[in-house]
Image: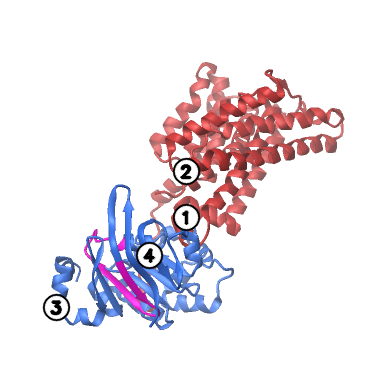
Amino acid sequence: MADLLRLEGVHTHIGQYHILQGVDLVVPEGELTMLLGRNGAGKTTTLRTVMGMWRASAGELGFAGTDLKPLATPDIARLGVGYVPENMGVFAALTVRENMILAARDGAMDEGRLDWIFSLFPALKKFWGLPAGNLSGGQKQMLSIARAMIEPRRLILIDEPSKGLAPAIVDALIEAMRELKRTATTILMVEQNFRMAQALGDGVAVMDDGRVVHAGRMADLAADPDLQARLLGLSLGAHQ
Amino acid sequence: MTDRTSDTASAIPAPPLAERLKAQAPYWTVPALAVLGLVLIADVSTWGTLTLAGLAMGMLIFIMASGLTLVFGLMDVLNFGHGAFISIGAFVGATVLLALGAWTGSDSLALNLGAVLLAIVAAMLATGGLGWFFERVIVKPVYGAHLKQILVTMGGLIVAEELIHLIWGPNQIPLPRPEVLKGSWVVGDVIVEKYRVLAVVLGAAIFVGLRWALVHTKLGLLIRAGVENGEMVEALGYRVRRLFVLVFVAGSALAGLGGVMWGLYDEIITAQMGLNILVLVFIVVIIGGLGSVEGCFIGALLVGLMANYTGFLAPKVALGSNILLMVVILMWRPRGLLPAGKG
């Protein structure tokens, strides 16, 4: 499978801190790649650097043959990259509907896609006209993911969708992600919840100290407890 | 999956009554202040006159403050240069009105309003264009640096004041109202100044129009979303900086409009008027909650009413009354009446 996103030796500085210290990462087209690692390993920074929210100070950032480094965030989004941030980035003062209208940048929302989203997240239909600030944490996460799904995207970056959610909601999210995967959308997902990672990941990359320290197939990592313990250590036990 | 999500969905309880009242409290501050004024003044006709004057003053301040609050909300830009647009708007408008002496001097309502309208259009074009230049040349290099913004926009304000002296001379300029807008009606015992009615109608129309645009147009949605989380708006593929320039230009044009109306309200204009009004404008923006047009509207009406009531009841306190109002409101709601986003 061709690589849709390719990072080579990417360094990112935030202020005086050197966060990414030469990240090499490949996201094959049509797959869901899991980005794992302990807190502070640089996972979120990697997503934000791809999105142009933080500038890479060195290295190569290629997306489907386009160099992302000189591009601003809106231009990267217009290449067909969707972003679901860790804090969900829901516009609380806007209604669920208005959130979705903004996400469908290219014009009116596609009815078919909307029905599909409603079938995955019925709560969004129920609270369609209500301010998104009134939603629960799980519903906000659903809205945030739905915003990335309302238009066909080539790549969706999702930052820890299971964070702070009840196990039942996480199951619902896993189901929705499986549906999204069926559309052959390429996804790069940061996750701390190994159960979710195992259920969804095709490929996996593990980060530590601003570098990717392991890259391979999720199935191989899932089948190898020793490798898990070595790569993920305590964080795995804490989140399982 | 369906069951789970709908279960959690229906699990959101309606907020208790006390919380709902607390959320609505900011909307009741204006009627509450009006009632308090009535009790203290204890004379309906005086109270009516003062209330109308307060509302008119508040509406004019709102027109000038609405752009500033959005400018801050969208890009965190503190623009002290906003006062320059008020002054320059007033001078451009005055130039048009004085040139159209035949129109303003006639008894025809149409000609009078036509002259005011032309003055407003000229002022808005001038200040809108100036706003664009100001944003590109003065504000853009200092995005994200508050101290530099304060210094450099203050500098811009001083340069603009000196430019006014250069173009229109150092003296204040008397600006008589058009014939039909002079004088007042007497309704019962209440003196209703005609110009104040125009100010209230215009201010209310601008508030309704702005609110409509913010709620019902995609551009408005983008502005509201951008005030809350500009980074996420960019991640959806919109260029927030372009949006900001647009809001900056529109806000500058509204300040120009406010300048013309304020000039006609005071019937005299000076190069320093913008700076003087800017103090009130900032109080209103802070009271309302940074980035909120509705909060700004409520704050402006409070400031207008407060200034007129205290001016009558305790003239010595009047000067500081709006600072007092700001202190009280910030003690009650530290982020202003209706803060928008950035939570």
Q: Please tell me the numbered disc located at residue A225.
A: 3
- The image shows residue B11 at horizontal and vertical percentages of 36, 66
Residue A146 vs A219, above or below: the answer is above
Cβ atoms under marks 1 and 3 closer than 8 Å = no
Count of numbered circles in the view = 4
Q: x and y percent of residue B324 in the render?
A: 45, 27
Alpha carbon distance from label 1 to label 2: 25 Å
Q: Nearer the viewer, residue A36 or B263?
A: A36
Single out the mark in the foreground, 3 or 4. Answer: 4
Span shown in magenta? A24-44
Q: Nearer the viewer, mark 1 or mark 3?
A: 3
Which chain is the one coloured blue?
A
Chain letter belonging to callout 2: B
Q: Measure how far apart labels 3 and 2 are at the Cα level.
A: 50 Å
What's the distance in space between the residues labelled 3 and 4, CA to CA? 33 Å
The amino acid type found where label 4 is placed reads Glu
Residue B125 visible at all: yes
Name the chain under label 1: A
Chain B: give its colour: red
| Residue for badge 4 | A60
